[in-house]
Amino acid sequence: MSEVIDKAVNTSSVILTDDAVMQLKRIMSEQNVPEEYGLRVGVKGGGCSGFSYVLGFDVQKEKDTVTYSNGIKVFMEKSHGIYLLGMEIDWLNGLNNRGFAFNNPNASESCGCGTSFNA
C-alpha cells in the first residue's frame, strides 16, 4: 500500500478551501478516521442534472490518482478526472446554506442544490 502512495502527486486537481479543510479535519477527528484514509472525490450517475458528486473518506484503490490539497490526501479514480479537474470544494456555513459546495468549471449546468451537474 505505501508503495502506491509514494507515487502521489504533490499538487491537486481538486482544490479544498481553508473552510472545507477545517470541516474535513473536524469530521475526521470526530469519526476517528484512520490515518491511511484519504478524502475520496468522485462522480456517479444520477441527480437532477445527470451526475452527482461523491465525497467521503476511503482507502486508496488501485485505479486512484492520489493528490494533496491544503494538507488533505485526495483519492480520485483516474476516469473521473475529466469531470473534476480544477474543481473547488468549499464549506458553507450560512443561514440558508450549510454544507460542502462544489464549484466545478467542467459543469455545463448544475442543479439548484449544487450537488449534481451535467458536463
Image (cartoon, rainbow, N blue to C red):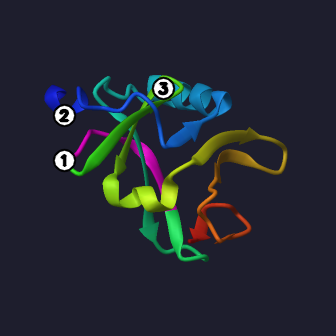
Please give the residue where the numbered disc 3 appears in the rendered image. 30
Quarter residue 66 falls in? top left
Residue found 77% across the figure and 49% down from its top: 97
* Label 2 Cα crowd, 10 Å radius (few <14 / some 14-19 / many 20+): few
Please give the residue where the numbered disc 2 appears in the rendered image. 4
Residue 4: image location, x then y, percent: 19, 34
Magenta span: helix, strand or loop, mainly?
Answer: strand
Decide which of 43, 4 is in the foreground and name it: 4
Q: Amino acid at mark 3?
A: Glu
Span of residues in magenta? 53-62
Question: Considering only vertical position in the picture, is 72 above or below 53?
Answer: above
**Residue 96 horizontal side relative to residue 57, left or right:** right
Q: Secondary structure at mark 1?
A: loop
Q: Could you tell me how far apart the alpha carbons at marks 1 and 2 are, in whole angstroms?
A: 8 Å
**Residue 67 horizontal side relative to residue 8, left or right:** right
Residue found 56% across the figure and 48% down from its top: 86
Q: Is residue 25 magenta?
A: no
Q: Amino acid at mark 2?
A: Val
